[in-house]
């Protein structure tokens, strides 16, 4: 099988410099292509998939630094190394020295090779994740189907009903985990489609909280909804935002002691809307405030070790909020409570 030669795109508007650079990189066994303007180089970078771009930093119009910035914003070109013929990945001054060109080009091509290998492994991981989750969900559908059928029997013995209910709950929890795995993978790879729209933050938050009312009532937990004085409209993906609210509210209830309280509030100011979800649960030590947003991180707090998850919910929330141009943080302990945990996430408000 013939190995593809690395492709180097030379961006230069002076013929003498083009010939000089071509002569210097040719002995490295690379394929070269030439762009005499920044606009031509941008198009060739998108369509030609070069492994390296050598660019004159002082190109007329769009200079080398601005071109590099635009390349990094485009998913199709962001991993292409750029070597300036005067500053990026490498730095080459004029008159150009052979050894400096060779070293800079070889290092940049090696970086691109490693980047491509990482991307290939990420694609393999994503494919494997999807395949495993697909198989797990098929098996879960069978288990949940039989559990639902058994629970529909009004004559089922109480001890068996209790056991089947536990099976069904575990199955539902596992479905949430597999869904979170898929969402986290898509957010990390940038393949999750984000569709921003105007969303009434309070109406959506109150609606999602209402879906968990049965859980709070069963444990005597007070669900306090702090309605804002005026409408708060955010710019966000409704489906993704619903998942963030579900995760945070579910966690707040899960780690709240029986007969405690969970509060939900929405406010706006300085161009952002803040949504706060607070409970009376055991405080999270300050040294863990950043770690809890990491994938698979598990922090033991108070006596709640029996309620730990797999550490994906908060990682998903952080990535989802940031994908919608927002930010999330945790405050604990909460000043007005004995202990407690408060999650606050902010999203840009809808303008106009």
Image: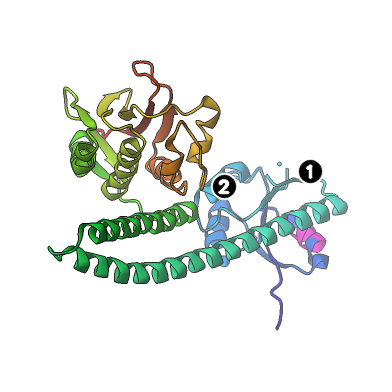
Q: What separation in Å lies between label 1 and label 2 (alpha carbons)?
A: 19 Å
Q: Is residue 320 above or below residue 4?
A: above
Can residue 311 be seen by looking at this rendering?
A: yes
Residue 8 placed where, x, y %?
Answer: 69, 62
Q: Residues within 10 Å of mark 1 (few under 14, many from 20)?
A: few
The residue closer to the viewer here, 233 or 249, is 249
Q: Residue at x 61, y 42 (%)?
A: 65
What label does residue 67 carry, if any? 2
The C terminus: image quadrant: top left
Taking 338 as reference, is 165 left or right? Answer: left
Q: Earlier in the sequence, mark 1 or mark 2?
A: 2
Q: Secondary structure at mark 2?
A: helix
Locate residue 261: give its quadrant: top left
Residue 22 magenta-drawn?
yes
Q: Dominant secondary structure of the magenta stretch? A: helix
Locate residue 235: give its quadrant: top left
Colouring method of the image: rainbow
Residue 239 placed where, x, y %?
Answer: 28, 50
Q: Residue at x 58, y 57 (%)?
A: 41
Taking 30 as reference, is 115 left or right? Answer: left
Q: Residue at x 34, y 67 (%)?
A: 140
Question: Which range is magenta?
Answer: 18-24
Can residue 47 be seen by looking at this rendering?
A: no
Q: Which residue has dot 1 on it?
A: 93
What label does residue 207 carry, if any? none
Taking 237 as reference, is 7 left or right? Answer: right
The N terminus: image quadrant: bottom right
Q: Is residue 352 above or below residue 242?
A: above
Q: Residue at x 59, y 47 (%)?
A: 68
Q: Residues within 10 Å of mark 2 (few under 14, many from 20)?
A: some
Q: Secondary structure at mark 1?
A: loop
Locate residue 109: give its quadrant: bottom right
């Amino acid at each position: 099988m013939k190995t593809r030669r690395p492709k180097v795109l030379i961006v230069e508007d002076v013929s003498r410099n083009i010939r000089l650079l071509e002569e210097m990189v040719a002995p490295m066994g690379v394929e070269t292509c030439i762009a005499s303007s920044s606009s031509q180089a941008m198009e060739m970078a998108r369509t030609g998939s070069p492994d390296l771009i050598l660019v004159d930093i002082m190109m007329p119009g769009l200079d080398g630094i601005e071109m590099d910035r635009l390349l990094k914003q485009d998913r199709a070109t962001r991993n292409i190394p750029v070597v300036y013929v005067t500053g990026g990945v490498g730095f080459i001054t004029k008159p150009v020295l052979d050894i400096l060109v060779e070293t800079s080009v070889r290092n940049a091509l090696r970086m691109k090779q490693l980047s491509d290998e990482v991307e290939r492994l990420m694609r393999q991981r994503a494919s494997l994740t999807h395949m495993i989750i697909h198989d797990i969900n098929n098996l879960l559908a069978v288990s949940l189907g039989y559990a639902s059928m058994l629970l529909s029997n009004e004559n089922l013995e109480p001890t068996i009903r209790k056991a089947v209910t536990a099976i069904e709950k575990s199955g539902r929890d596992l479905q949430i985990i597999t869904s979170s795995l898929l969402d986290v993978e898509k957010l990390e790879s940038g393949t999750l489609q984000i569709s921003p729209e105007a969303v009434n933050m309070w109406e959506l938050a109150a609606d999602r909280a209402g879906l968990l009312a049965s859980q709070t009532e069963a444990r005597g937990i007070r669900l306090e909804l702090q309605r804002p004085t005026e409408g708060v409209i955010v710019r966000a993906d409704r489906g993704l935002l619903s998942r963030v609210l579900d995760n945070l509210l579910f966690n707040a209830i899960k780690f709240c002691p029986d007969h405690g309280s969970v509060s939900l509030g929405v406010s706006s100011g300085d161009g952002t809307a803040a949504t706060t979800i607070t409970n009376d649960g055991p405080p999270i030590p300050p040294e863990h405030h950043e770690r809890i947003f990491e994938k698979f991180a598990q922090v033991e707090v108070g006596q709640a070790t029996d309620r730990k998850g797999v550490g994906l919910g908060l990682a998903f929330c952080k990535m989802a909020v940031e994908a919608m141009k927002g930010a999330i943080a945790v405050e604990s302990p909460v000043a007005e409570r004995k202990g407690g945990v408060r999650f606050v996430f902010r999203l840009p408000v809808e303008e106009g």
